[in-house]
Amino acid sequence: EQPRNISRPGQLLLLTMTSAKYDFGVVGLGRMGASIAGSLALRGCRVAMYDKSHFDREKGWNILSADMKTHVEQGMITPAEKDAALGRGKLVETLEEVVDSVVVVEAIFEDLAVK
């Protein structure tokens, strides 16, 4: 398959192969993980978003949505860009679903036993 360019002008060139379901997987959806997922989605990446419980996944999605709303209100992005980015993020229920990503970002709290 052909690689697709997911970078913006003036940024590091990122190429992904379209055979993976997601460009990035983010494990851990606290403030940092949700922000990472949002930044990737705004840049055109398909992002699998995982946390250990339904509550934590929903909390992460709410953080991401609120951040996007703030970006629109501040004129940083348009409502259409927000909607497109949110459409590229997907909450997944298992770590196995994250495996179908080109790159996985770990953003869980600092507990070596969990990592």
Image: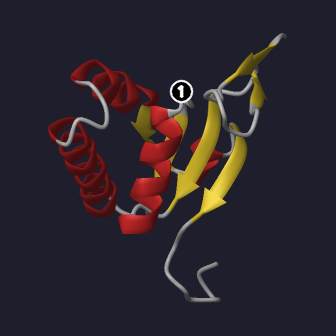
In the image, residue 41 sits, relative to residue 103, either above or below, namely: above
In the image, residue 66 sits, relative to residue 51, either above or below, namely: above
Asked whether, in this view, residue 41 is left or right of residue 64, the answer is right
Say which quarter of the image contains residue 35.
bottom left
Q: Quadrant of the C terminus?
A: bottom right
Depth order, front residue of 91/73: 73
Considering every residue shown, the one lying at the far left of the view is: 73
Residue drawn at (49%, 54%) of the image: 36
Q: Position of residue 6 (x, y in %)?
A: 65, 26
Depth order, front residue of 112/2: 2
Residue drawn at (72%, 46%) of the image: 103
Q: Is mark 1 on a helix, strand or loop?
A: loop
Considering every residue shown, the one lying at the far front of the view is: 10
Q: Where is residue 91 in the image (x, y as percent from the top left)?
A: 40, 42
Residue 15 visible to an observer of this rendering: yes
Say which quarter of the image contains residue 84.
top left
Residue drawn at (52%, 73%) of the image: 108
Q: Quadrant of the N terminus?
A: top right
Asked whether, in this view, residue 55 is left or right of residue 22, the answer is left
Residue on which the image places disc 1: 44
Q: Callout 1: 10 Å neighbours few (<14), some, many (20+)?
A: some
Q: Where is residue 42 in the image (x, y as percent from the top left)?
A: 45, 34
In the image, residue 110 sits, relative to residue 10, either above or below, namely: below
Amino acid type for the residue under numbered disc 1: Gly
Residue drawn at (31%, 31%) of the image: 77
Asked whether, in this view, residue 31 is left or right of residue 10, the answer is left
Q: Position of residue 82 (x, y in %)?
A: 30, 29
Specify the color scheme.
Answer: secondary structure
